[in-house]
Image (spheres, grey):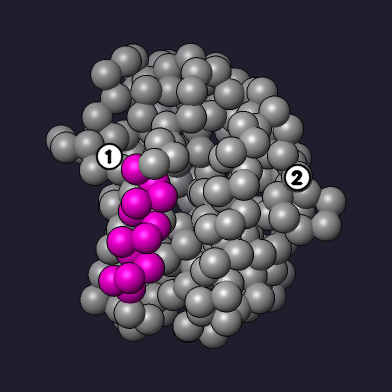
Amino acid sequence: MLYILIPTFNEEQNVPKLAATLNELVGGSDYQIIIVDDCSSDDTLNALRSALPSSNLAFIKKEVNKGPGDSFLLGFEEILKKSESDNDTVLTFEADNTVSVDDLKLLVKIATLDFQLVLASPYAQGGGFQNTNFLRKILSFAANLLMRFLFDIKVLTLSSFVRAYRVGLLRKIKAKYPVMIESPGFFSMAEITLKAVKCEARIIEVPVVVQSKERIGKSKMRIIKTSIEYIRMLLKIRL
């Protein structure tokens, strides 16, 4: 089974291309798409309902906007309830169309091999950024470099939303830690990656090019707020 988990927040304009990507991605697969909406004020959910088959689509609509980390936690918990096999795959990515469908297909394919976590990496050889704000690139690079130094790990990209997990790894993390994801915000992906490393997960990184020009609207990440969150969580986290 392939589970596709996508957090959304005011992505109505990006839905047409997202729906086309999803329809191409899941062709011939046994799959379920889980959308966790963080209190969108636009018509994101109705647009998705109209564009995707309802039989393979589930929604978790939050009552309070808490951020993507909280959305991923809710989605993972729901998938762990539904999944019947540790070999099921969970693909996560953003709704803003910044990663190509070919890259997403590659992640899913590699996840069927002997890996528990497949990370999409703009920092791996062959990856990169297109039309991404220079300051954002510098801060992303610095944050990943700092975490690699602090925690002495070899993973190049800890913070990307685009990745594929084996359900067995998520169960292992849940068994080891009282809360799978403590950070409600953008630090969440770094947090669960670090926890996966501590659980001795078999991890591989795949080069991708982040195509910011494909996004309609602005990124939901706020640089100053996210930087403060990273500092606070790095001081707090105990692995």
Residue type of the residue flagged with mark 1: Ile
Residue type of the residue flagged with mark 2: Gly
User: Disc 1 marks which residue?
Assistant: 60
Q: CA distance from mark 1 to mark 2?
A: 32 Å
Q: Magenta stretch mostly in which secondary structure?
A: helix
Residue 53 lies, with reference to residue 62, above or below; the image says above
User: Disc 2 marks which residue?
Assistant: 128
| Residue depicted at 58% across the width and 72% down the height | 148
Give the side of residue 171 with respect to residue 65, left or right: right
The residue at the far right in this view is 126
Give the side of residue 188 with respect to residue 121, left or right: left
- Judged from the image, the secondary structure of the residue bearing numbered disc 2 is strand
Q: Is residue 28 magenta?
A: no
Whether residue 205 is visible to the viewer of this picture, yes or no, is yes
Quadrant of residue 20 within the rendered picture: top right
| Residue depicted at 62% across the width and 54% down the height | 141
Give the side of residue 11 with respect to residue 232, left or right: right
Provide residue 139's location: percent of width, then percent of height.
55, 48
Magenta-highlighted residues:
225-237
